[in-house]
């Protein structure tokens, strides 16, 4: 797969893709990431990429022309007739649809993703209208530019490419993982450690611990120190549900829950009430 990033700050990306999974994926040839300096597509000697907004107001707006010329130099297909499996063009924008794990999964199946980074007050609307397939926001806050958003998208997508992670199943068992409990159970039945214990399906990951068994007076839960994989699996599922309930109840509402999950949630409510009563 390939990413083309159009930006006025190509230097921003110099080292960001040189670590860990991203670096390995590039070395293995799983992904190519190219940055393109928008100023290289301007038509005046000052290399002007922005202009004042029609209608007045503060700030400057990125012009459409250099962005269209950059896209043309990358031989981006016309929006009408673009094959969505081969190519997609995304404008980073606070006004965009939220970037989610399921969009990351969708993008991981596309051959080339073109990311356009805005700056200043934003980008001439005709870029979104005529060139982009979608506007994407990485969260409900306003950043100074689209570069961080582009890096977030590249990172989240590349780790989903087959071969990018050390363990091929890892991505399925993370927060927001695919809802595939049957596969999860199959994987556990292979006799390996209980990786599937939170069952994915759009909820958050369970808490992780490593050595030492006690740190600053806080012990690792006993169940994780025994070898009972069924008990570990159940504990992890319960803790994943609890974390989701406490931090992202909106996800629970959208997740298909089993009878066991509902029982665990009732237990969690009881645990929480008991903990609140025990507080001084
Ligand atoms: N005037 C815009 C607004 O209020 O929505 C904010 C423009 S922002 C200062 C400049 C650029 O940063 C945007 O064009 C966009 O490319 C990028 N940006 C800002 N917030 C973002 C977000 N939450 N997600 C993705 N890109 C963002």
Image: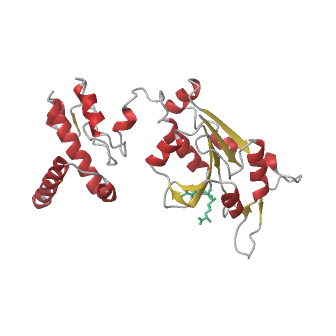
Across and down, in percent, residue 21 comes to: 49, 31
Across and down, in percent, residue 216 comes to: 23, 40
Ligand 1's image quarter is: bottom right
- Give above or below for 187 relative to 155: above
Which quadrant would the N terminus be assigned to in this image? top right
Relative horizontal placement of residue 256, taking residue 49 as reference (left or right)? left
Residue at the right extreme of this rendering: 45
Residue toward you, 73 or 5: 73
Q: Residue at x 35, y 40 (%)?
A: 174
Residue at the front extreme of this rendering: 81
Quarter of the rendering containing residue 144: bottom right
Which quadrant would the C terminus be assigned to in this image? bottom left
Across and down, in percent, residue 13 comes to: 63, 40
Colour setting? secondary structure
Residue toward you, 16 or 227: 227
Q: Residue at x 59, y 45 (%)?
A: 84
Residue toward you, 192 or 130: 130
Relative horizontal placement of residue 103, taking residue 207 as reference (left or right)? right
Residue toward you, 273 or 214: 273
Residue at the bottom extreme of this rendering: 55
Relative horizontal placement of residue 241, taking residue 124 as reference (left or right)? left
């Amino acid at each position: 797969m390939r990413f083309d990033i159009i930006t006025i700050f190509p230097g921003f990306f110099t080292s960001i893709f040189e670590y860990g999974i991203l670096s390995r994926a590039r070395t293995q040839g799983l992904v190519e990431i190219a940055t393109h300096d928008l100023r290289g597509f301007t038509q005046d000697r000052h290399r002007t990429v922005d202009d004042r907004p029609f209608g007045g107001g503060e700030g400057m707006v990125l012009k459409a022309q250099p962005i269209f010329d950059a896209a043309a130099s990358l031989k981006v297909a016309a929006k009408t007739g673009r094959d969505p499996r081969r190519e997609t063009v995304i404008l980073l924008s606070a006004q965009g649809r939220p970037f989610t794990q399921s969009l990351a999964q969708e993008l991981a199946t596309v051959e080339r993703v073109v990311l356009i980074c805005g700056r200043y007050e934003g980008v001439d609307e005709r870029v979104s209208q005529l060139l982009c397939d979608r506007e994407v926001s990485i969260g409900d806050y306003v950043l100074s530019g689209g570069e961080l958003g582009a890096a977030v998208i590249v990172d989240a997508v590349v780790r989903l490419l087959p071969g990018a992670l050390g363990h091929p199943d890892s991505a399925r068992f993370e927060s927001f993982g695919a809802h595939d409990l049957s596969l999860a159970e199959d994987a556990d039945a292979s006799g390996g450690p209980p990786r599937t214990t939170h069952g994915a399906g759009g909820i958050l990951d369970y808490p992780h611990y490593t050595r030492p068994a006690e740190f600053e007076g806080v012990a690792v839960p006993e169940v994780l120190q025994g070898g009972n994989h069924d008990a570990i699996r159940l504990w992890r599922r319960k803790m994943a549900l609890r974390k989701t309930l406490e931090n992202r109840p909106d996800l629970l509402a959208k997740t298909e829950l089993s009878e066991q999950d509902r029982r665990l949630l009732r237990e969690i409510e009881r645990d929480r009430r008991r903990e609140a009563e025990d507080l001084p």
